[in-house]
Image (cartoon, rainbow, N blue to C red):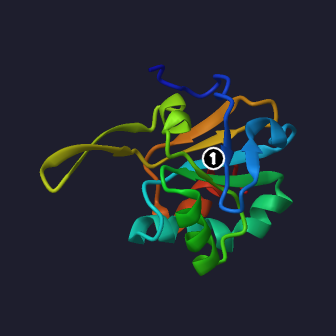
């Protein structure tokens, strides 16, 4: 597995969102994309992160950003999560973990003294030409939008 770095071409992806729509990176040519990977729908940290991005979506849109979430949950799980919290952006279901693996965010984690495989919470900012501009590995779930805006001094 390749370790992605800033300045590299982002892996192309295609997946199905909570509404049954196909979402591809190429759909966002010319826009910056906040591609955030999260472990699980309806968990405390993931809900805080999604709601923080939702609450700042107008600012993201005004600044030319699109927001896309990815987790290994099912389309049905994403639909319930998006409906419950009024999440207006695509949540891609990656049950095969292809996108997760392509971006290097499926890996070993440690919690409560045990090791297991899971999603390593990470956000990639991809420019309009498909190049990774920034990678955020220490995500502040409750203040994630501010983390991103601070990078761009916005």
The residue drawn where x is 61% and y is 68% is 79
- Residue position for label 1: 35
Q: Quadrant of the N terminus?
A: top left
User: Which class describes the residues within 10 Å of circle 1: few (<14), some (14-19), or many (20+)?
Assistant: some
x 83%, y 41%: residue: 27
Q: Which residue is drawn at the image coordinates 49% and 70% (left, top)?
A: 47
Q: Nearer the viewer, residue 8 or 90?
A: 90
User: Does residue 14 sit above or below 89 in this rendering?
Assistant: above
Residue 34: image location, x then y, percent:
67, 49
| The quadrant where residue 13 appears | top right
> At which x and y percent is residue 37?
52, 49
Assign a secondary structure to mark 1. Answer: strand
Front in this rendered view, residue 104 or 72: 72
From the image, which quarter does the C terminus lie in? bottom right
Farthest residue, direction left: 113
Q: Is residue 138 above or below residue 146?
A: above
Picture quadrant of residue 85:
bottom right
Residue 60 position by quadrant? bottom right
Residue found at x 44% / y 49%: 121
Residue 63 is situated, as x and y percent measured from the top left of the image, at: 82, 56
Q: Is residue 116 depicted above or below 145 in this figure?
A: above
Q: Is residue 22 visible?
A: yes
Task: Name the side, left or right, on which 84 lies relative to 47.
Answer: right
| Rendering coords of residue 41 (x, y %) | 48, 65
């Amino acid at each position: 597995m390749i370790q992605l770095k800033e300045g590299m071409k982002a892996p192309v992806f295609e997946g199905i969102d909570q509404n049954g729509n196909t979402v591809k990176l190429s759909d966002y040519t010319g826009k910056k994309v906040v591609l955030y990977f999260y472990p699980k729908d309806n968990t405390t940290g993931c809900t805080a992160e999604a709601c923080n991005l939702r609450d700042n979506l107008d600012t993201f849109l005004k600044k030319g950003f699109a927001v896309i979430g990815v987790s290994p949950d099912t389309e049905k799980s994403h639909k319930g999560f998006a409906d419950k919290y009024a999440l207006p952006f695509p949540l891609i279901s990656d049950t095969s973990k292809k996108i997760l693996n392509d971006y290097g965010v499926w890996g070993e984690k440690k919690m409560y003294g045990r090791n297991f495989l899971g999603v390593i919470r990470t956000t990639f900012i991809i420019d309009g030409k498909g190049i990774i501009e920034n990678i955020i590995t220490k995500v502040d779930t409750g203040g994630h939008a501010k983390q991103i805006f601070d990078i761009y001094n916005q």
